[in-house]
Structures are given as structure tokens and as C-alpha cells.
Image (spheres, helix red, strand yellow):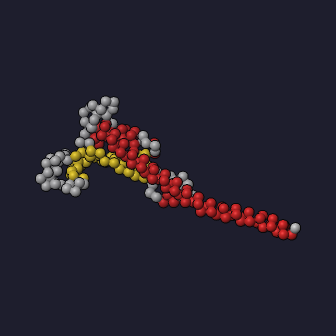
Amino acid sequence: MQILHLVRAYWAQSRGAAAAEFAFVLMVVVFPLLNVVDFGMYIYQGMELNEAAQVAAQAALATCTYGGPPNYSGPPQLPATVVCTGLSSAETTAAQSTSLGSGVTITSTTENYYCTNSSGSLVTVGTFPNSMPADCSSVVTGSKDLPGDYILITVSYNYTPFFTGVSMTSLLTSPITRTAWMRLS
């Protein structure tokens, strides 16, 4: 009987130890898992913000170059940042059409004349509202190409981690900012 009593006492004590070990292991496993979830959401929202910037740039093209909805047949309104009356609302509506919704904000819209240099990079050759240069010879010697009218749209979104108390993603940059280019002409 004495041995049976000792065995029962041992099992009673070991169950508490197992619970303590389980709690410790659970913390070690759950902490990284919560960080993976938050980091995944940060990356996903960054990708959605890329989409929002691109959609806003496409809306600028459609509204100011092709006349806008409903039939996209009006005259071009270029330079867009100067004469296109529907630019701001079209950009905002388009940028907020992603799953991030109204949390997306347009932080800047700039428009300039660019030429492509010999390595394929864009180089600014004129700013609005100044006149467009005659050609791209200032970038590529002897070039007769016309400069392109490009619009650059910057959007941002304030990221908030799901698990603020334990997540390392609170150390990542917020707001998340992305840009998109679009050639208008």
C-alpha cells in the first residue's frame, strides 16, 4: 500500500510538471508563429499597396489621356497635374479600390518630362509647368526622340500589427509607402 501511495503521489506531481513544460513549450512555439502571421500580413499589405499605386497611375492615364469614363473618348488633358480636373478623385477612388480600402492615401503626384538614357534609365529633362524640351538630345547625343510625359504617384498605408504586444513587426517601417510610374504621352 505504501508503494501504491508513493506512485500516486509521483503521478500527481508529474502532471503539474508536464503542464508547466507544456506552457513553456507553447510560449516558445506561439511567439514565432504570431510573428510569422504579422510579418505575412505586412508583406501582403505591401503588395496590396503596390497594386493600389499602380491602379491609381492607370486611373490617371485613363482619366487624363483617354478622356475618362464612361466612354474614354474625350480629348487629352495634359499636363495632367495642371489641367486634368478629375485627376485627384480618379486617383483616390482607384487607390482605395483594393482590399486596403480607405486606409490608402495618395501622398504625392508629380509629373515631369523624361527621356531614356543609353542604359535604359529615365532622366528628368523638364518639369511642369515649364515647356517640354524639343528632343532628348540633352540625355542621348543626337537623339531626335521626344521626351515622355510621366506621372509618379506615391501612396501610403498605416500598418498596425495584429499582435502588438509580442510582434516584432512593430519595428518595421510604418506607414508603408509605394510608388508607381505611368507614361501619359
At x 22%, y 46%, the residue is 148
In the image, is 124 to the left or to the right of 143? Answer: right
Labels in figure, total:
0
Of residue 19 and residue 170, the one placed in the foreground of this image is: 19
Of residue 75 and residue 10, the one placed in the foreground of this image is: 10
Residue 40 in view (yes/no) = yes
- Placement of the C terminus among the 4 image quadrants: top left
Q: Quadrant of residue 121?
A: bottom left
Residue at the farthest left position: 142
In the image, is 165 to the left or to the right of 145? Answer: right
Residue at the farthest right position: 1
- Placement of the N terminus among the 4 image quadrants: bottom right
Q: Position of residue 5 (x, y in %)?
A: 84, 67
Q: Position of residue 22 (x, y in %)?
A: 66, 62
Q: Position of residue 136 (x, y in %)?
A: 17, 50
Of residue 32 and residue 124, the one placed in the foreground of this image is: 32
At x 29%, y 38%, the residue is 64
At x 42%, y 40%, the residue is 97
Residue 88 in view (yes/no) = no
Of residue 54 and residue 156, the one placed in the foreground of this image is: 54
